[in-house]
Amino acid sequence: MNDLTGTRALVRLALRRDRIMIPAWVLPLGLLVIAMRSAISGLYPTQASRTSLAASMAANGSLRALYGPVYDTGIGGLTAWRMGSTGPALAGLMALLLVVRHTREEEEDGRLELLGAGAIGRRAPLAAALLTGFGTSLALAAIVTLGLLPQGATGALAFGLAFGGAGCCYAAVAAVTAQLTQSARAAKGIAGALLGVGYLLRATGDAAGPGGPGWAAWLSPLGWAERLRPYAGERWWVLGLFAGAVPVLVALAHSLVARRDLDAGLLPSRPGPEGAGRRLSGVFGLAWRLQRGALCGWLSGYAVAGLVLGAITKGAVSLGNGNKSVADELNSLGGTHNLVDSFLATMVSFLGMLAAVYAVQAVLRLRGEEIGGRAEPVLAAAVGRIRWAAAHLLVAAAGSAALLAVGGLALGVGYGAAVGDVGGQLPRMAGAGLVQLPAVLFVAAVAVLILGAVPRLALAGWTVASLTLALGLYGPLLRLSRWALDLSVFTHLPRVPSAPVAAAPLVWLTALAAVLTAAGLAALRRRDIG
C-alpha cells in the first residue's frame, strides 16, 4: 500500500458529503457574474457612459482600492472590473473552507482515524481534499467562462481562469495551514488571515498612483487574478504565477503531513494553567473562552474595514457627482438623493450583514461542541441544556453588538478625519451601526431555530446569512423585484443615517428574534444531543 492508496474513494466520499455545499457555492457565484454582465449593460448602455466611468475611476485611488482598475470599457471588461476584486477572493474562501473541512476537521472529529484503520494511505486524505478543492475551483471557472461567452470567448476564458487560479492557490494555502495547527478553527483562521492580507496587498497596489507601491498587488494571488486582464489584452503569462505557486504549496503540505502525528499540529500547543480561573468557573465563562478568539479577530477586521470605508466615502461621493449612473446606483442603495448619506447608509448596512455572518458562526459553535463530543461532559454536570445554549447565544448577541459599535465608530473616524468632523461623526455613525442589531439578531435566531429543530440541517443557517448578504450587496444593482429584495431582513430597517430612525421595525424584528430563539431552545431541550 502506497501513501496515496484510497484517494479516489475519499474524493467520492467528499463529493457525496458536499453534494449540497459545493453547488451552493459554485452556482450563486457563477450566476452572479452572469447577472452582473446584464446589470452593467443596463447601467452603462453607451460607450460614452462607460468611458466616463473608466476616467472617473482612474482618477480616484480610494475606489480603485475597493474595486480595482478599469482595463477595458466594453461590457465584458467592466464586468471583469466589477467582479474582479471580490469574485476571486470568494473563490479562494470557498476552496480553503473545503480543504480544511476534509483534512483538519476530519482529524479533529475523529473520522480520519477510523478511515485510517482501513486501506488508506498516509497522504490520501490530503490529496483527496486538494483534488476536491481544485475540482470545485475549476468547475466555478467553467461556469464563469460560459456566462461571459457572449462578450468574447478569449476574455471569458481568462476571467474564468482568474477565479479558478485564485481558488486553487488558496486551496493549497489551506492544505499547508491544516498541517500547522491542531484545530480546524485555527487552520481556517490562518488561511483566512492570509486571504485578507492578499486582499489588502491587492488594494494597496490598485490604489497606488504613479511612483506608488503598485508592486504590492503582485505579491497577492488576488492581484494576479486582476492582472490577467480579461478583455484587455490578456496576459496569459500571469497564469504561470499560479502554476508555479500551487505545486510548491502542495509539495510543502505533503512534506509537512509526513512529519506530524495524526491529530497533531506542527505548531506547539500552548499548555493551559494547572487549574481553571474564576472566569472559567461557570458555563458562561466557558462559552466566552471558546468564542473570544474568533470575536477578537472579527473586531480587528471591523476596525480596519470601518476606517477604510469611511476614508473612501469622500472619493465615492466625488465620483457620483461626476457620473450620473454612479450617482443613481448609490442613491438606489442608500435610499436618498444625498450621496454622502446614501454611501454611509450602504456601508453601515454592509457592516450589519457581515455581523450576521459572525452571529451565525457563533451560534453554530453550539453544533460544533455537540458533534465534537464536548457538550456531553458539560451537560453531565449540574448544567441544563438551556443554560448551556444561552451562554453561547449571549456571547453571539453581545459580540454582534460590539462589532456594530466598533464598525460604526471606525466608519465615523475614517469619514470624520476626511472632512474634519470626527467629533460629530463618531456618535452619528455608532448609532447607525447599532440600528442594524435587530436584523442581525433575527438572522441568528433563524440559525438557532434550525439548530434546535433540525440539527442535521444546522449548516442551513449559513444559507440564510449568505442570501442576506448577496441580496443586500447586489440586489439593488441587479434591479431585482421588490419582493426579492424584501427577502433580506436588512431591507426592512431604516436607512440610517440617510433616514430618521423608526422604532416600529426595530421592535418587531427584536420581538420576532426572541420568539424564534425561544422556539429553537425549546426544540433543543426536547431532542437528543449529538
Image (cartoon, grey):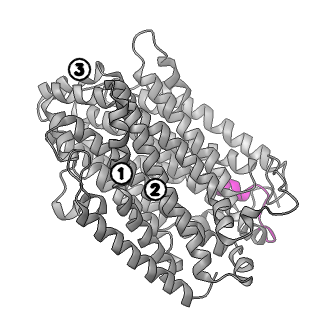
Which amino acid, mark 2? Ala
Q: Is residue 22 visible?
A: yes
| Distance Cα–Cα, label 2 vs label 1 | 33 Å
Q: Percent x, y for residue 24?
A: 42, 62
Which amino acid, mark 1? Gly
Image quarter (top left, top right, bottom left or bottom right) of the C terminus: bottom right
Q: Is residue 143 visible?
A: no
Q: Which residues are magenta?
A: 116-129
Of badges 1 and 3, the one in the foreground is 3
Q: Is residue 64 above or below residue 344?
A: above
Label ID, residue 401: 2
| Distance Cα–Cα, label 2 vs label 3 | 40 Å
The residue pinned by badge 3 equals: 55
The question of residue 121 being in magenta is answered with yes
Horizontal side, residue 110 vs residue 405: left or right:
right
Q: Residue furthest top?
A: 211
Image quarter (top left, top right, bottom left or bottom right) of the N terminus: bottom right
Q: Quadrant of residue 514?
A: bottom left
The residue pinned by badge 1 equals: 30
Q: In the image, what residue occupies the spot 15% across and 34% down?
A: 325
